[in-house]
Image: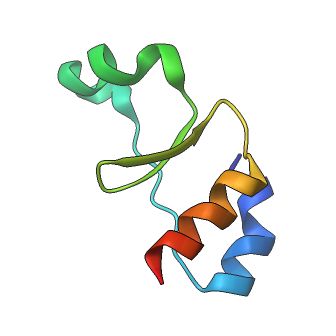
């Protein structure tokens, strides 16, 4: 997913923060079955692979 996001980062100028959930038992419990997961704050955008339409919808909602 990280590689698939690179062209979108250039277009929409955002940063990606990779969070290793293995070091936090609460995060592991909450997200382990759904990684990789793309989220902004508490808003989940997509999981497992980049869904471009979901990302576009997220940017439209942010405007």
Question: What residue is rendered at 48% in x and 84% in y?
Answer: 63
Q: Nearer the viewer, residue 34 or 52?
A: 52
Direction from residue 44 to residue 28 in the image, left or right: left
Q: Position of residue 29 (x, y in %)?
A: 28, 14
Q: Compare residues 39 and 6 and report the one nearer the observer.
A: 39
Left or right: where 35 falls relative to 56: left
Query: In the image, what residue occupies the spot 72% across and 37% down?
Result: 49
Residue 31, percent from left and from top: 39, 23
Residue 40, image x, y percentages: 40, 58
Measured along the vertical axis of the image, is residue 15 above or below residue 52?
below
Q: Residue at x 66, y 52 (%)?
A: 54
Q: Residue at x 60, y 86 (%)?
A: 13
Is 1 positioned to the left or the right of 26 in the image? right
The chosen color scheme is: rainbow
Image quadrant where residue 52 sits: bottom right
Residue 9 versus residue 33 in the image, above or below: below
The quarter of the displayed image where residue 26 is located: top left
């Amino acid at each position: 997913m990280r590689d698939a996001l690179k062209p979108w980062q250039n277009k929409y100028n955002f940063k990606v923060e990779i969070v290793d959930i293995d070091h936090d038992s609460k995060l592991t419990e909450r997200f382990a079955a759904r990684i990789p997961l793309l989220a902004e704050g508490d808003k989940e955008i997509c999981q497992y692979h980049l869904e471009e339409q979901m990302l576009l919808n997220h940017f439209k909602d942010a405007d």
